[in-house]
Image: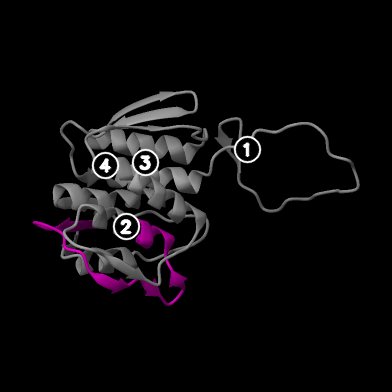
Amino acid sequence: FGLGGKEYPVDRFLIRGGRRLTGEVRVAAAKNAVLPIFAATLLTGEECVIRDVPGLADVATMLELLGSLGVRVSRRGRTVRLQAGGRITPEAPYEVVRRMRASYYVLGPLVGRFGRARVSLPGGCAIGPRPVDLHLRGMEALGARVSLEHGYINARARRLRGAALLLEGASGPSVGATANVMMAAVLAEGETVIEGAACEPEITDLARFLVR
């Protein structure tokens, strides 16, 4: 959990009840919604302003990744301004991706807008290993050519095309794969229909951002 801009590992919460609660607490925005929205700013050269951004390590890592791609990043308090209007390098290096699996969110928007992406295979996380096959299946369904070389996923497409696809694996829907396909489909030609899509709140937030 995050506290004072730092993250701490949690094994359990021990709550002793029976006391009347008073006072106020500021509830930060959801990190899981912010990260894919940050990645989605790669889809446009216009400036995007994201407000009420939580001060967490994963947020800083995603901003570092986008900055390394060439995105202009400005952060002031809880407000972040992002603009991918200059020269963008469509490669997410292992040094950054290994620190946060959510770095993989850049795959969809990079292929969608620039027609190519080179993204390192993501590192592990506390939840355990989670394969990325659904992400790749989604990119291929939209017409991208996907290959694995030296620990990197290479995806290329002259122009993505909308498709109907089932995006559900043995463990059920994938939030990350759903988000990646949604972002890739924004600039694809035609309509994309995702069956077996994840329905978490962060997917709804991303959808609202993409519409805007």
C-alpha span from label 3 to label 2: 14 Å
What is the three-letter code of the residue carrying label 1?
Val
- Counting residues from the start of the chain, the first of labels 4 and 2 encountered is 4
From the image, tell me which residue sits under label 4: 42
Q: Tag count in the figure? A: 4
Q: Indicate whether residue 51 is drawn in magenta.
A: no
Label 4–label 2 contact, CB within 8 A: no
Q: CA distance from mark 1 to mark 4?
A: 28 Å
* Mark 1 residue crowding within 10 angstroms, few (<14) / some (14–19) / many (20+): few
Q: Which residues are magenta?
A: 150-179
- Mark yes or no: residue 31 visible: yes
The 10 Å Cα crowd at callout 2, few under 14, some 14 to 19, many 20 or more, is: many
Amino acid of disc 4: Leu
Q: Tell me the residue that label 3 is attached to.
A: 38
- Secondary structure at numbered mark 3: helix
The amino acid at mark 2 is: Met
Residue 168 is inside the magenta segment: yes
> For the residue marked with disc 3, what is the amino acid?
Phe
Residue linked to disc 1: 27
